[in-house]
Amino acid sequence: MTPAQIAVTAAGAAAIVWVLWYFLLSRRPAAAAALAGQSGVQEIRVLVKGGYTPDTILVQAGKPVRLQFYRDETADCSERVVFDAFGINQTLPAFQTTTVEFTPDTPGEFPFRCGMNMLKGLLVVEPADANRKAASSPHKFHG
Ligand SMILES: [Cu+2]
């Protein structure tokens, strides 16, 4: 690996550790969203074990969403997670964290589910906050 690749890998690992720490130590209610730094990526960790925890995920429209599904079981039921509205049908290996990324452009409520439509969750996309949007312009210069 080049130093740049190592740096990117290390940054990714640090981000994952932060997400784990954040959601394990801060006992949040059902809905949770975190804006991670200047990138404005909304990172949410979801525990997959007999269901989705949290099963309601609150995000803002127009900003990238990064869901970290940790599947803490081998039950076939939760083998896949499906977001019909976003064309996502992702395999979730057992005892691993799988990242699902997309950007919801329109506010609304978008169900997600397992491949068999037994486990269910809901992604709630709220209109982007006008003030926040102005402060996190994607065209901001990175020095
Ligand atoms: Cu299922």
Image (spheres, rainbow, N blue to C red):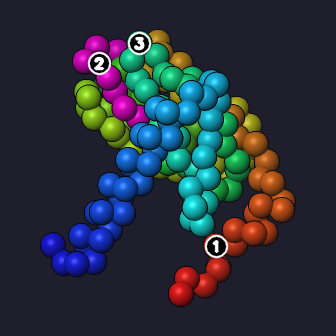
On the image, the x and y values in percent for residue 143 come to: 53, 87
- Which element is circle 2 on? loop
Badge 1 is on which residue?
A: 138
Q: Amino acid at mark 3?
A: Gly
Mark sitting on residue 73: 2
Q: Is residue 116 visible?
A: no
Task: Look at 34% across and 27% down and name the residue there.
Answer: 71
Q: Quadrant of the N terminus?
A: bottom left
- Residue 65, compared with residue 83, is above or below; it is below
- Residue 95, compared with residue 65, is above or below; it is above
- Which element is circle 1 on? loop
The magenta span reads 69-77
Q: Horizontally, is 88 left or right of 4 in the view?
A: right
> Between residues 40 and 91, which one lies in front from this camera angle?
40
**Cα–Cα gap, marks 2 and 3:** 8 Å
Q: Are marks 1 and 3 in contact (CB under 8 Å)?
A: no
Q: Residues within 10 Å of mark 2 (few under 14, many from 20)?
A: some
- Mark 2 or mark 1, which is nearer the start of the sequence? 2
Q: Find out whether residue 32 is within the magenta segment.
A: no
Badge 3 is on which residue?
A: 50
On the image, the x and y values in percent for residue 116 come to: 41, 16
On the image, the x and y values in percent for residue 102 come to: 52, 50
Q: Are marks 2 and 3 in contact (CB under 8 Å)?
A: yes
> Between residues 59 and 81, which one lies in front from this camera angle?
59
Task: Look at 74% across and 37% down and name the residue there.
Answer: 108
